[in-house]
Amino acid sequence: MPTVATKSPATLTGSFTPEAFAAHLARVAHLPAWWLDRKRAAYARFAALPFPKRTDEGWRFASLGGLTLDGFAPPATVDFKQTAHREIGVTGAGTLLLANHKLVFHEPISPGLAARGLIFDTLQNALLQHSELVRAHLLTQPSKLGSEKFAALHEAFLEDGAFIYVPKNLEVELPLGVFHYAAGAGAAVFPHTLIVADDHAKVTIADFFRSSHEAEVQFACGGNDIHVGHGANVTYVAMQDWSRESLSFQFNATVVRRDARVLSVNLHSGARQARHESFSQLQAPGAHSEMLALTIAHGTQEFDQRTLQIHQAPNTSSNLLYKNALLDQTRTIFSGLIVVDPDAQKTDAYQSNRNLMLSSDAEANSLPGLEIQANDVRCSHGATSARIDAEQEFYLQSRGIAKPQADELLVFGFFEEVLSQIQNQELHDQLAAIIRRKFKDN
Amino acid sequence: MKPPTELSGTTVDNPVIGIDQSKGDFQYDVKYEFDAGTGLSERTIDYISAAKKEAAWIKEFRLNALKVFQSKPMPTHWATKDLENINFDKIRYYLASGQKPKRSWDEVPEDIKRTFERLGIPEQERKFLAGVEAQFDSEAAYSNIKDLVAKQGVIFCNSTEALREHPEIFRKWFGKVIPTGDNKFSALNSAVFSGGSFIYVPPGVKVAHPLQAYFRINAENFGQFERTLIIVDEGAEVTYMEGCTAPKFSTATLHSAVVELVALKGAKIQYITVQNWANNVFNLVTKRGLAHEEAEIKWIDCNIGSRLTMKYPGVILKGRKARGEVLSIALANDGQHQDTGAKMVHAADETTSNIIAKSISVGQGRSTYRGLVHIPRHLKGCKNNTECDALLINTNSRTDTYPAITVRGDLNATQHEASVSKINEEMIFYMQQRGLTEAQAMSLAVNGFINDLARQFPMEYSVELKRLIDLEMEGSVG
């Protein structure tokens, strides 16, 4: 077996050669110098860092064979009318649609909200108009979960994305929708959504990731930053539905301040191999983070989810629930860690991974971890992997419901606990539609 | 960074107040007739092999293991960096008093008897525990239950004797459950092992009395590398107990054992350990059992002493309906890291396993649970239950939990639960109201926390365990 670590420097970058990076820099040369400097530094890190090795704890159980970066290229500008966008359907406070990094559709926020200071724009516009605000929040948190190399690649090649700033005390009732499309075979995309909610602000963001065609081989290396100010309330719903031939990385960093609350729901449906890293920091008393995820795995898909919840202050709480439904020959990996810092007394943290095994060839790996350095805490975790309850199975069979329909019903029953957390009915239906389509396509 | 408690006021040399260190804190002059010096090379192995008059295949086995040991890196990509503090060149790898194992109490040398005195085994109990196999440094010094069980056809001897006298029985399984290359420390043990117990129980024989062995380390910088292999034939049963105390030294010392259990069809093995090494010992042990059809292997593992313990008793469930169980208690005080856990590898249908781990962290002690449950493809009816509970006594005590669970297919089920808590204040208040001191109350609460596991220990072990917890808790409050 060839070890990736010993590859020559050239192959450490795959398609993302210094020439490709220079071409990228030329495309974004009009952006602020600090950002270009950071991109150069990120590219240097990316090019120097080795590929993950078998012995890396952060990659335990993951398939390393499919992590190749060869054969990708910056995507061509697409005529958006060619792409399938039939299901863009959140009637929200605003919509941004980026296809291959280019803004192709924009439903602006109401003048009223804009007058009150809400910013909902592309990342490039924000970099030009709100440089310091972006600088203070964009990719400021370290990558700690094993993908330093790919996170650096994301920063280096990040071309455009979405920026949301909710000023103090502003409550945005309807969701803001961000759509990231990838189109064309071999397309490499680097979507990013940056959310900054100032003190006592409230907002809901829906982040969609989709390919124009199911069979295209693509590379998606995306990220999102969520900054939740004192007393603010952020709901973030991400729907990863890349083509079934793509390799996907998603990096999340969430910072939660005093008495703030964040609810994040991640639906993982697409990609051949998808890795999601989520890093939550509870920085001040009263902070609460709700981390929910649903994975629906078909065929030979592999979903690798790594999470870290750090409680840095007393009286913080977090609740993580990751539910995976495994069909066919799929693999899932859940590796979570709750860290309670020495002085974070009265922490209340929970972490749970539930795997519903719907096939005799599926494989679920669970690594629920705890690192606790304070004694007056409530911390627990649970992990289960099993098929459905025999009685439920009998009930379905005795009514003559065929296996595919039964599986679909069971998955929806299994996911309901998470789906019901999404208050907005339209968003709820969007998620359900993605899950349902998965069963139809298979 | 130390918490501002009385703990920090005590001497640096002995941060673990409360524990009766003096109990194991002794060192008598012993004439080491065979002393391989310090450091590890092929010459060390030549020396050990010659001293033991070993067969050529064993020497070959050792030399091969040495190469594996030298080629393997330290597992610090997942384990604590504290391992880097082991200086392999300063360790003595072999010592033996050169005596033949003794047959009766009268034949045991006076200085060794004194050692037992200090271990605190009462005169009465010594007679009762007629089968104590006391490992004095590398070699077994005393054994007499042997004769008793020999009547049932049981073979109970040390590794050297077993491989010399009964190769037809032991060679088949030796190094098979834990291959040399399993990990760096199993390779080290395979290179320099001496002492330990080899046991064979014939088919259908149920050994009524638990077989016992005490291990100690009694020379500065002297690593002890005992090797144990227990083979229980079809339908037979045995319980083995291992307890250790060690003298306290100023420089670190290393203990690295390999314990292999083989339970043939329908056999039952229960292996009980109470580990109480001094606080400067690295205790890096590989323990694994192989359970054939309908066999049952149960590890009861209690870790109180040592500077760093890394030990994850495991069971390979090889035959249909085999059962594995690990019950683990760990207590970590200042300067200690108990990195313990369990491994369950399901390799046949309808195999079941259960892991219950409880840990207590006192002062700045750190306890870690590390577990592995593996259910490969195309099996059915496999079940695992894992429960880990951690109790944190002081504000900055530390605990970690790192399980790894792999399940393939939809015909198996696993569940894992872990919780972290502190002692219930109401409970302490209730007891203090009734006239108990805080330390007594804490001690009762901690004993309550592990009670359901402690009950599974044999009487004398659970009594000793309770006493040790009392002593540990005295230093933890105030």
Image (spheres, coloured by chain):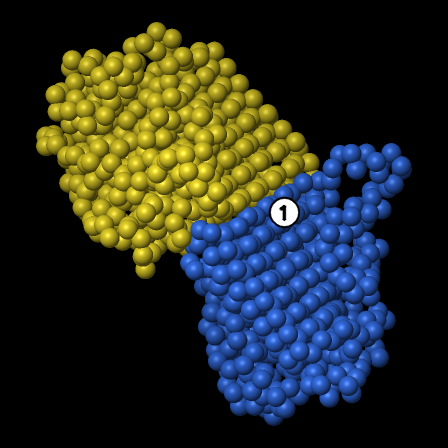
Chain colours: A blue, B yellow
Compare residues A431 and A442 and report the one nearer the observer. Answer: A431
Residue at screen point 64% across, 66% down: A262
Residue at screen point 52% across, 60% down: A315
Amino acid type of the residue tagged 1 in the rendering: Ala
The 10 Å Cα crowd at callout 1, few under 14, some 14 to 19, many 20 or more, is many
Q: Quadrant of residue B448?
A: top left
Q: State the SS at label 1.
A: strand
Up-down relation of residue A34 to residue A435 (above or below): below
Q: Which residue is mark 1?
A: A364
Could you say where residue B339 lies in the image, as x and y percent from the top left? Answer: 40, 44
- In the picture as drawn, the residue positioned furthest to the bottom comes out as A30
Could you say where residue B15 lies in the image, as x and y percent from the top left? Answer: 25, 48
Residue at screen point 64% across, 34% down: B379
Residue at screen point 78% across, 57% down: A435
Up-down relation of residue A379 to residue B118 (above or below): below
Instruction: Look at the image and tell me in which quarter the N terminus of chain B lies.
Output: bottom left
Q: Quadrant of residue A100?
A: bottom right
B358 on left or right of A31: left
